[in-house]
Amino acid sequence: MRETLVLNASFEPLSTVSLRRAVVLVMQDKAVVEQSHPGLRVRAASIELPVPQVIRLCRYVRVPFRQRAPWSRRGVLVRDRHRCAYCGRRATTVDHIVPRSRGGGDTWLNTVAACATDNHRKADRTPAQAGMGLLTKPFEPTPADSLLLALGLKDGETLPEWLTVRGAGASSGPAAPEALPA
């Protein structure tokens, strides 16, 4: 299911919602479509509208300041773009660099996306003990970056100029993970 970025009335990123929720917000006149997927439309008996990629709320919503993006398994997979940190294939699981049984926690810097094969091969060891190297270094995304990563921007794609000018925070999309030397 497609994810839609929700902007506050002041153009600050707030969250991502499902396509269904985004359409409901637009239909209830609580939000307007700022950017849509080219060529895709949602059709009903009496209405047709573009499939929203970014919507903006019509009324400002006060949100408490968040310094850190909350950690989640889904967030790690999105941050690493569903690519295994050990082999580069499609990742479906999250691996703890320092296993939880050895004191490693659920943190951005201790978890990476991994394919089931490599996660099983590494087992309850550190990458060094298992003889496996990381292709990318884990990083902690900012709250704005985690929302933008959830949009699934492809390499080379940037945010629309209207979003970067109005203060969404980033000028060229989310920070990419830093590659480690071989």
Image (spheres, helix red, strand yellow):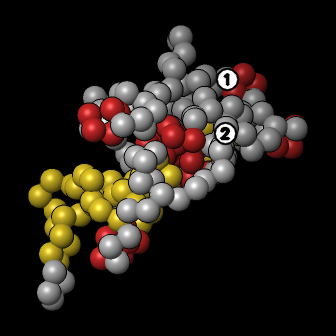
Residue under label 1, please give it: 131
Image position of 118 with respect to 40: above or below: above
Q: Report helix, strand or loop for mark 2.
A: loop
Amino acid type of the residue that numbered disc 2 sits on in the rendered structure:
Arg
Q: Which residue: 38% across, 70% down? A: 30
Q: Report helix, strand or loop for mark 1.
A: loop
View extreme (bottom): residue: 45
Indicate left or right for 174 with 41 as reference.
Answer: right
Residue under label 2, please give it: 68
Q: Position of residue 8 (x, y in %)?
A: 45, 53
Earlier along the polypeptide chain: callout 2 or callout 1? 2
**Which label belongs to residue 154?**
none
Q: Position of residue 51 (x, y in %)?
A: 23, 63
Q: Residues within 10 Å of mark 1 (few under 14, many from 20)?
A: few
Visible in this render: residue 66? yes
Who is closer to the viewer here, 102 or 10?
A: 10
Q: Which residue: 60% across, 53% down? A: 63
Q: Which residue: 57% across, 48% down? A: 75
